[in-house]
Amino acid sequence: VEMSERGGGGGGLGNAWICLNLSFVHRKFKLRLPPCVEGVVAPCAPALALCDPAVLANEHRVQMQAMIVRIMKSKHKVCHNALFLKVRQEMAGQTAFVPTNADFKKNLDVLMEKEYIERDPCSEGPPAYIYIA
């Protein structure tokens, strides 16, 4: 914005005019916003320019798998319900995303295919999982 005075008037604002420079471009033209998750903004999440559902779903999937592996490393053997509750509690604390049981089961299956965990063949009753080192 450029400001100057017309004529040699007595310094009043009545003679001033403003010119807007439309070709000006600031080097930080992007606005960084945290990702949207079901209408809630996560305070610690990395900034994303867009709230793309596919990107968020992939991010949540990776976060959940990392959380499951972290818990399994510390416990070595956990039953299904205890693992689900622990993952749900920690995910809700770190992000605004709260996983469903279906999401949890899908990620468990993926980790079993990657051979990070396996079902405990000796467990009776509810299924238990063992971390494979």
Image: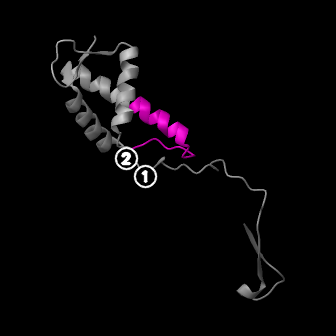
Residue 56 part of the magenta-drawn span = yes
- Of the numbered discs in the image, which one, if any, rests on residue 41? 1
From this view, report whether residue 24 is shown above or below residue 81: below
At 74% from the left edge and 56% from the top edge, which residue is drawn? 24
- Quadrant placement of the N terminus: bottom right
From this view, report whether residue 14 is shown above or below residue 51: below
Residue 78 is situated, as x and y percent measured from the top left of the image, at 20, 23
Residue 77 is situated, as x and y percent measured from the top left of the image, at 19, 19
At 43% from the left edge and 36% from the top edge, which residue is drawn? 60
Question: Mark 1 packing: few (<14 Cα in 10 Å), some, or many (20+)?
Answer: some
Residue 68 part of the magenta-drawn span = no
Q: Which residue is mark 2?
A: 96
- Of the numbered discs in the image, which one, if any, rests on residue 87? none
From this view, report whether residue 5 is shown above or below residue 98: below
Residue 61 or residue 79, whichever sits in front: 79
Range shown magenta: 44-63
Q: Secondary structure at mark 1?
A: strand
Query: Are dots 1 and 2 in contact, CB under 8 Å?
Result: yes
The amino acid at mark 2 is Ala
At 79% from the left edge and 56% from the top edge, which residue is drawn? 23
The amino acid at mark 1 is Val
At 46% from the left edge and 34% from the top edge, which residue is drawn? 59
Q: Secondary structure at mark 2?
A: loop
Q: Earlier in the sequence, mark 1 or mark 2?
A: 1
Answer left or right for 50 relative to 22. Answer: left
Residue 28 is situated, as x and y percent measured from the top left of the image, at 62, 48
